[in-house]
Image: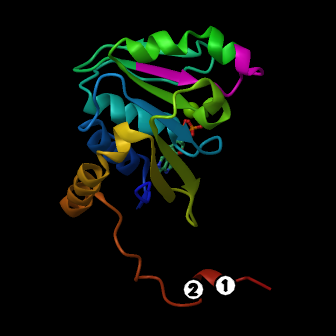
Amino acid sequence: MSPSPLQTRTTSVDQTRALAGAVAELARPGDLLLLVGDLGAGKTAFTQGFGAGLGIDEQITSPTFALVQGYTGRLDLNHLDVYRLEQIDEALDLGLSELLDEGSVTLIEWGDTITSALPRDYLEVRITFGDEADDRALELRPVGPQWQARMRALSIALGAWAAQGAGPVADDTLAPGEDGAGAC
Ligand code: ADP
Ligand code: MG
């Protein structure tokens, strides 16, 4: 039986980066994370925070044109964006199996589009837009044994992250109906 996904929210890009840094604390060589969400959801922002958590000093940017970008840190990071891949064969041509065997951590934006070319052992991070411009919902779903075994640790890490005050605050300041003004 698979453990249930973890769900959390952020209200700024810095919170998403900080949360990703907390996830990176648990990273191990050979790990794979798939980042799922529409354009502008925060997949690259998550990667930036994750990279910072791995001790990568270099600026992480969108690898859309390079497809694969490598960074050196406490653990090395491979950052891929497969948005523009038109054929699954192109994903296979990237030499994914070599990337995954190298002992580094691999994050793939739009990775859900190439799951048939990937091992079934990864953490899927799904980011969706919330009500306000900077609100995001994040769902962390383990697929396969590597991350399933770490879900308790991940839950504790995210709980500690939220408790530090970095996490979302309860939004009870908005009066009922206040956001409905102008609706007809
Ligand atoms: P993607 O890689 O999914 O296309 P990016 O990470 O490149 O998305 O862009 C996310 C954009 O959304 C950035 O401009 C970022 O500043 C903004 N943003 C606003 N709020 C958040 C949030 N809570 N989490 C992540 N990004 C956010
Ligand atoms: Mg991106």
Q: Name the residue under label 2.
A: 178
Between 183 and 151, the residue placed more toward the observer is 151
Vertically, is 100 above or below 153? above
The stretch in magenta equals 78-89
User: Is label 2 in a helix, a strand or a loop?
Assistant: helix
Q: Do the residues labelled 2 and 1 touch (CB within 8 Å)?
A: yes
Q: Is residue 86 magenta?
A: yes
Task: Indicate left or right for 83 with 127 as reference.
Answer: right
Number of dots carrying numbers: 2
Within 10 angstroms of label 2, few (less than 14), some, or many (20 or more) residues?
few
The span from disc 2 to disc 1 (Cα, nearest Å) is 6 Å
Name, please, the residue furthest toward the right.
Answer: 184
Q: Does the magenta stretch include residue 103?
A: no
Query: Residue 117: where, in percent of width, then height?
Result: 62, 24
Q: Residue at position x 61%, y 21% from top? A: 64
Task: Indicate left or right for 49 with 107 as reference.
Answer: left
Task: Indicate left or right for 43 with 153 as reference.
Answer: right
User: Is label 1 in a helix, a strand or a loop?
Assistant: loop
Between 117 and 20, the residue placed more toward the observer is 117
Name, please, the residue furthest toward the front.
Answer: 1
The amino acid pointed to by label 1 is Ala
The amino acid pointed to by label 2 is Glu
